[in-house]
Image (spheres, rainbow, N blue to C red):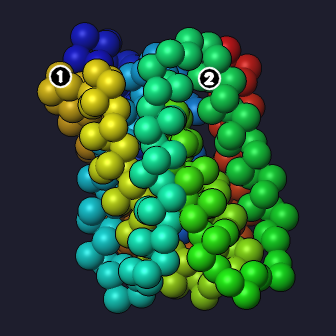
Amino acid sequence: MLNVDWTVILFANIVTGAAALIGSLTGFGYALLATPLLVLVLPARTVVPLVLASSVVLLCMLVYEARADMDVRRIGRWALGAVPGMLIGGYVLSVVSDGHMRSVIGGITLAAAVVLWLRPSHPWRREWPGALVAGALSGVLAGASGMSGPPVILFGLKQQWPHRVLRATLIGYFALVHMLALFVLGGVGMVDATLLESGSLVLPGVIAGLVFGLKWRNRVDQALFRYIALGLLGATGILALVGV
């Protein structure tokens, strides 16, 4: 990324800024929005660890703000399933071509938009088996595409958790899992000091999105914003598929 022209860097900051704004408002969506657009101008093997690294910065700042509403037990169940899943996902990313990864990333994004739109009901009485499965699927996606959100977001919506608890628990889980995913990708040679250094070039966009997101979070109608977020998920998924 350090050798990429400044037009690409500016584009990357706009993308990460918009994604950080949405992530700050809703507690999810940073990787889902940033990854499909960044793979249009950068290789998937560069984008995935770059998005993970920048998301960790964003999430660590959000953790402090949301700490009072987090459910640590639920985070632990998701994480227990996610760890083995990340090992599988990291291996997949190391052997699959960039073109195929763009297709996977675009498909995941579109699928996420559909399942979030459907917003399933009828929660399970026993949460922990479904939580482990959701965590495992999330880990695979985290290692292979950097987008760990769809399985756990879907699970939280299905269980009808209160909005504040779901948002805060997602923030805590994503912060933990994305840090673990970086270690996994580093173990297969996909994260090094140069890549992490290049990640600093998108931090201005991340910080700007965070500032505006926290400023507007209590003033934005959540129902309306949900429609906007889902529309963006669908649009970015289509762009990733078209850009293959």
Which percent across, then down, holds residue 22?
51, 59
Q: Residue at x 76, y 46 (%)?
A: 111
Seen in the image, is 82 located left or right of residue 189?
Answer: right
In this rendering, the answer to whether 177 lies above or below 182 is below
Q: Residue at x 60, y 88 (%)?
A: 162
Amino acid carrying mark 2 in the image: Arg
According to the picture, the residue beneath numbered tag 1 turns out to be 194
For the question of whether residue 171 can be seen, the reply is no
Which percent across, then down, holds residue 140?
54, 42
According to the picture, the residue beneath numbered tag 2 turns out to be 102
The kind of secondary structure element at disc 1 is: helix
Disc 2 residue crowd, few under 14, some 14–19, many 20+, Cα 10 Å: many
In-front residue for pair 66/122: 122
In this rendering, the answer to whether 152 lies above or below 193 is below
Seen in the image, is 120 located left or right of residue 133?
Answer: right
In this rendering, the answer to whether 72 lies above or below 8 is below
Q: Quadrant of residue 100?
A: top right
For the question of whether residue 12 can be seen, the reply is yes
Q: Quadrant of residue 181?
A: top left
Amino acid carrying mark 1 in the image: Thr
Count of marks placed on residues: 2
Where the C terminus falls, by quadrant?
top right
